[in-house]
Amino acid sequence: MIKSVVFLVLLLTNSFFTSLNSQADTMALPIFQHRLSKNLIEDLSNGALDESKVASQLTYIGEYLKAQEISYDGPIAWGFDTLTWEDQVYFADFSPIDAIASIIEESAKHQIVIINEAHHKPQHRMLTRSLLKGLYQNGYKYFGLEALTNLNDSIERKFSHGTTINERGYPLNSPVSGTYTSEPQMSNLIREAITIGFTIFKYEEFGKEREQNQAKNIAKILEEDPEAKILIHCGWYHLLEKANNEKRWMASYLSEYTGINPLTIYQDILVERYSSKESPFYEMIKYDSPKVFRNQFGEYYNGFKGNSYFDILVYHPRTQFVMNRPNWLYHYPGNKSYDIENITVGYPCLIKAYKSNEDSHAMPIDIIEKDYENDPTVLCLPLGEYRLEITNDSGDKEIRTIIIK
């Protein structure tokens, strides 16, 4: 774990980028080490990891509820923390409609779609995944993700048997591919996009001009292909179209550099919160599937009149749990539960499910933790053949092969 973390820190520094090309030939692929929840929470208690890293890494092993209980929610801004009578009257003019179908419909009017996520809420990635086929049919062929490490293709090939993520079709379980790509639903989002036909591209940057440089990297796609239609999946505020507290964000600069007004979709207000107060807007809405809201004039609800931070708010229903797994995992077509019994390495343990036809360093399709012998937690997998790797806290492993029919 320490080697992977040190590598990632180095990877995100400008000096390391300049030297990596010559070093890559002699460096082994660094592997991200998924860890048991008890070890992550212990690191939070002793200060070795902060809330953001622990919450994110808990989602990497399927521990959604534990991740939400960590204090990592972004602040509820722009007045969504209060609900006035005028707010309720204004909202009453909007009707709930299916989020996926309506976003796909609206995307046909735009050249760039930007949708955000909270990094510890994989259901946001699931919604973007559900949009892919419809967006592709509407002409969107490029898909940029903040989660991807911004290595050039020649360097990536040196670490990954001569392939890039678009050529392989999946991310590696390594900071060479990315950070949040170590969460299975993020990696599955990328897999599906490539399978559909999207060209995946990297645009992440760091430093004082992070937002400007992210926007410039995205704009390069349009310099090469002026008619390109682009989907961007980013974190939190990067999609804000105007300055917030005097800070400008990526979408604002992208609009300036390209002259294109993107369709911006915010996911982390009308969604459940465990460790912080929910928006009263969320508490007054109850539906069983993701919704957006539109009035008789075709205008989408984005919180209040004149809001120009973003275009559309997505409502996500409260998570229900089926065999210790979030119910939204089962909403994706083809996903089935699979229980693991008679584990020989003992408990607690991590169970990783790899596609049998992918490289041994590929990101698993799913990861769960089982804490005790009759723990009801199950894998959630689509049809196919998988290699299971079951590992206890001492590093002892058990390997199995399963077929989901």
Image (cartoon, helix red, strand yellow):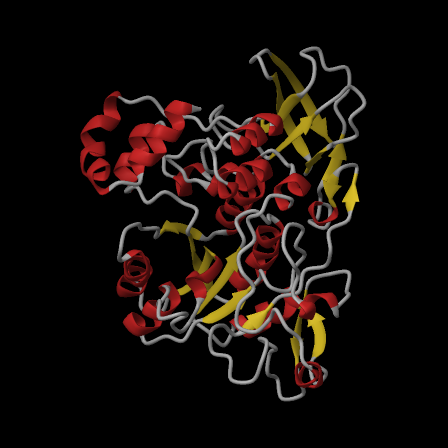
Does residue 162 appear anywhere in the picture?
no
59 or 288: nearer the viewer: 59
Q: Residue furthest bottom?
A: 297
Where does residue 12 sit, x and y in percent of width and height? 31, 40
* Image quadrant occupied by the N terminus: top left
- Give the side of residue 320 with respect to residue 128, left or right: right
398 or 320: nearer the viewer: 320
* Image quadrant occupied by the C terminus: top right
Where does residue 33 sit, x and y in percent of width and height? 49, 26
Residue 157 falls in image quadrant:
top left
The answer to whether 252 is drawn above or below residue 344 in the figure is: below
The answer to whether 8 is drawn above or below residue 400 in the figure is: below
Residue 262 falls in image quadrant:
bottom left
Q: Residue at x 55, y 30 (%)?
A: 40
- Give the side of residue 215 with respect to residue 306, left or right: left
Q: Residue at x 65, y 39 (%)?
A: 66
Label tally: 0
The answer to whether 119 is drawn above or below residue 358 in the figure is: below
Q: Residue furthest front?
A: 46
Residue 20 falls in image quadrant:
top left
- Give the side of residue 65 with respect to residue 30, left or right: right
Q: Residue at x 76, y 27 (%)?
A: 339
Q: Residue at x 18, y 38 (%)?
A: 18
Where does residue 314 sit, x and y in percent of width and height? 62, 66
Where does residue 19 sit, x and y in percent of width and height? 18, 33
Does residue 289 appear anywhere in the picture?
yes
